[in-house]
Image (cartoon, rainbow, N blue to C red):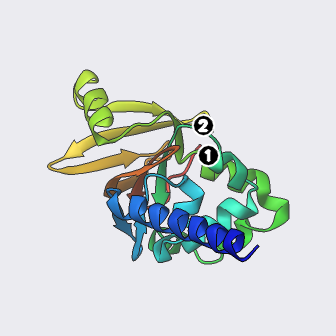
Amino acid sequence: MKKLFLSAVAIVAIAIASNTSVQAQEKTKMVGGAAMYPSKDIVDNAVNSKDHTTLVAAVKAAGLVETLKGAGPFTVFAPTNSAFAKLPAGTVETLVKPENKATLTKILTYHVVSGKLDSKAIAKAIKAGKGKAELTTVEGGKLWAWMEGKKLMLKDEKGGMSTVTIADVYQKNGVIHVIDTVLMPK
């Protein structure tokens, strides 16, 4: 019995060590002070970013956690806390109320595009579009992407603009691009 217990402990220790070793070998990006692991899903990575606590709270309030933990693939343009802070005072507090779930969901799904569009795929679409790419969001609206020098820019349906500040944060179910301004659908 003691040998069986020690064997089980050894197996668990090896499993933990090999998982840690695999994660240590992954090519991670730092976002909000935390490593983002390509072997984790969008939600499991985002919850560790201190720059995305508002986004994570909004995703939870909208009931989108399970969707963003799903197979995808998804391309998420992820606004930082400071992006949400640019909204008029009280906007976020109002949006996360249960009675505003539909509006919050519309805004959040406007930041998601089906498929795994890393910066190379977006650059290819921009080139094919002769300088501008039109992206259809999960919400059903449109976003436009183009380059300004080395910066990837986005424009929403209301004319608002956002800059990708960290591109190509790979996830097991897609890719995240960190943005500096919340995008708004019509």
Residue 32 in percent (x, y) is at 42, 73
Task: Count neighbours of disc 1 (C-alpha within 10 A) and say few if under 14, some if 14 to 19, many if 20 or more.
Answer: many
Image marks 2 and 1: residues in contact by CB distance under 8 Å: yes
Residue 128 in percent (x, y) is at 26, 22
Q: Quadrant of residue 89?
A: bottom right
* Residue designated by label 2: 138
Report the side of 39 relative to 108 (left or right): left
Q: Residue furthest right?
A: 99
What's under tag 2, amino acid-wise?
A: Val
Of 115 and 150, the residue lying toward us: 115
Residue at 58% in and 64% down: 11
Report the side of 94 relative to 18 (left or right): right
Of 182 and 4, the residue lying toward us: 4
Where is 23 relative to 111, above or below?
below
Where is 22 relative to 31, above or below?
above
Q: Quadrant of the N terminus?
A: bottom right
> Tag on residue 109?
1
Of 116 and 78, the residue lying toward us: 116
Q: Residue furthest top?
A: 128
Res 8 seen here: yes
Q: Secondary structure at mark 2?
A: loop
Q: Quadrant of the C terminus?
A: top right
Of 169 and 129, the residue lying toward us: 169
Res 179 seen here: no
Residue 95 in percent (x, y) is at 71, 65
What's under tag 1, amino acid-wise?
A: Thr
